[in-house]
């Protein structure tokens, strides 16, 4: 499976392409939840090449988003294996993994319930992942609700 336009829209809606400068380029910024690591740029991109002082063009942000989204989609496909999965379920889990990492999806009750065919139970698990640095974040609460809605659609 590959991410649909609904997945792309959802991830971009919540990640945003933040910290645009007057010249149209984008600055790296600290994680809003922790106030530090991981540093982020563009459409929620993190990694060893993203640190204070890094500046990208819109094209660099868009190109990296495509690469990252495809990487997460491949990872999610491997994680879910041969479990019956609809496109909306796949898209919701890709958004989840893009935001929280594949490791968190791998060890989640959400994934266990999905693989067991307990789709209602899996959908209810999204909302449990709404904290950053131990604090409930309104944006994460809204994102998890949107992912759960997409998963159930």
Image (cartoon, rainbow, N blue to C red):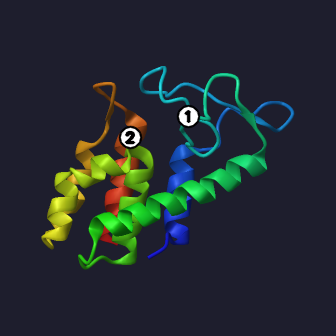
| Distance (Cα) linking label 2 and label 1 | 24 Å
**In the rendered image, which quarter is residue 46 located in?**
top right
**Label ID, residue 48:** 1
Viewer-proximal residue among 52 and 95: 52
**In the rendered image, which quarter is residue 39 located in?**
top right
- For the residue carrying disc 1, how many other residues have a C-alpha within 10 Å: few (<14), some (14-19), or many (20+)? few
Q: Residue furthest front?
A: 48
Residue 150 in view: no
Q: Which residue is mark 2?
A: 140
Q: Residue at x 15, y 73 (%)?
A: 117
**Label ID, residue 124:** none
**Whole-percent x and y of residue 150?**
38, 65
Closest to the camera, between mark 2 and mark 1, is: 1
Q: Residue at x 62, y 37 (%)?
A: 41
Marks 2,1: beta carbons within 8 A: no
**Whole-percent x and y of residue 23?**
87, 34
Residue 90 in view: yes
Q: Is residue 44 above or below residue 123?
A: above
Viewer-proximal residue among 66 and 117: 66
* Horizontal relation, residue 12 to residue 24: left or right: left
Viewer-proximal residue among 148 and 81: 81
**Whole-percent x and y of residue 138?**
39, 35
* Horizontal relation, residue 22 to residue 35: left or right: right
Callout 2: helix, strand or loop?
A: helix
Q: Is residue 148 above or below residue 103?
A: below
Figure label count: 2
- The quarter of the rendered structure image containing the N terminus is bottom left
Q: Is residue 56 above or below residue 119?
A: above
Q: Residue at x 55, y 42 (%)?
A: 44
- The quarter of the rendered structure image containing the C terminus is bottom left
């Amino acid at each position: 499976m590959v991410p649909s336009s609904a997945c792309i829209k959802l991830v971009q809606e919540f990640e945003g392409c933040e910290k645009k400068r007057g010249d149209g380029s984008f600055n790296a910024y600290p994680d809003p939840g922790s106030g530090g690591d991981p540093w982020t740029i563009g459409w929620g991109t993190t990694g060893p090449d993203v640190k204070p002082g890094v500046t990208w063009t819109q094209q660099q942000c868009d190109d990296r988003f495509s690469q990252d989204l495809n990487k997460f989609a491949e990872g999610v496909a491997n994680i879910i294996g041969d479990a019956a999965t609809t496109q909306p379920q796949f898209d919701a889990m890709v958004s989840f993994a893009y935001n929280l990492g594949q490791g968190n999806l791998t060890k989640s009750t959400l994934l266990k319930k999905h693989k067991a065919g307990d789709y209602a139970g899996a959908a209810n698990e999204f909302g449990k992942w709404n904290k950053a640095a131990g604090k409930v974040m309104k944006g994460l609460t809204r994102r998890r609700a949107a992912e759960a809605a997409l998963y159930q659609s």
